[in-house]
Image: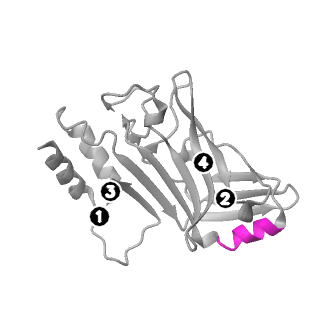
Amino acid sequence: MKRFLYVTLLLFCCHVFSPLAFCSEDYYIDNSRVLLYKLINWWYDCTPDESHLLCGRPLRYQNRDNARVEYNEAENTLKLKVKGGFADLLSILKPCEKCFGPSYLRCTWMNRDYFGNGRPAIVSRELSSITEFIFYDFRKKQAQKIQGIEKDILFVLKGMVGGLLNGKIALHRAGNFFKKCPGLSQSQADHFPISLKIINADKNEILAEYSAIWKP
């Protein structure tokens, strides 16, 4: 019965797309494309027996066609700007200063064919307020290569549903939740991995990978 309720909910919140339909921002739960704001609205109003149906589900967010590449040759700095920011319906980093949770995103791998010896800055704010990813020590030749694929840059964020927090679905368990998922404690970071990939969608090549770093 619980599985039936979950499937019904997911179908209710799915998009109905033609094969050629395209959006610059998309949310997926269990690989099904959904209208996330509908799920958030439902979660606020659902019964206690239903409030756990989304807990622990894999969530994916994709953003394409919003990247803008800027290069400052004098400072050897490249910026991947995201028009309008992104993932504004998700809480990725912990909202409380002293609680244990994801504190920032750190680049764990870069494709040197594209980024050369560039040094990525860490991401330490909520993604909804972030409008750019910065890379230092960036050479002009490498910057031109990134500029050449600007229209094909795809951002893919992945995590697990951890609860409903301040009108957003959280990918962690840190903070004062309106709807909190039962079971795992907020200190079990391995159960809530958060990753971000920057991809050349035209060639399906990963450009860079970021992972959430959990701290008190």
Left or right of residue 189, residue 51 in this image: left
Q: The disc labelled 1 sits on which kind of residue?
A: His
Q: Earlier in the sequence, mark 4 or mark 2?
A: 2
Above or below for 38 versus 203: above
Secondary element under disc 1, as helix, strand or loop, is loop
Q: The disc labelled 4 sits on which kind of residue?
A: Tyr
Decide: few, some or many residues near mark 2? Use Cα within 10 Å; few <14, some 14-19, many ≥20: many
Check if mark 4's residue and mark 2's residue have beta carbons within 8 Å. no
Check if mark 4's residue and mark 1's residue have beta carbons within 8 Å. no
Q: Which residue is mark 2?
A: 80
Q: Position of residue 42 (x, y in %)?
A: 24, 45
Label 1 to label 3: alpha-carbon separation: 6 Å
Q: Earlier in the sequence, mark 1 or mark 2?
A: 1
Residue situated in front as seen by the camera: 189 or 8: 189
Above or below for 144 versus 4: below
Q: Which residues are magenta?
A: 141-149
Q: Which residue is mark 4?
A: 210
Q: Which residue is mark 1?
A: 15
Q: Earlier in the sequence, mark 4 or mark 3?
A: 3
Q: Position of residue 82 (x, y in %)?
A: 59, 58
Q: The disc labelled 3 sits on which kind of residue?
A: Leu
Q: Which residue is mark 3?
A: 35
Q: Is residue 90 visible?
A: yes
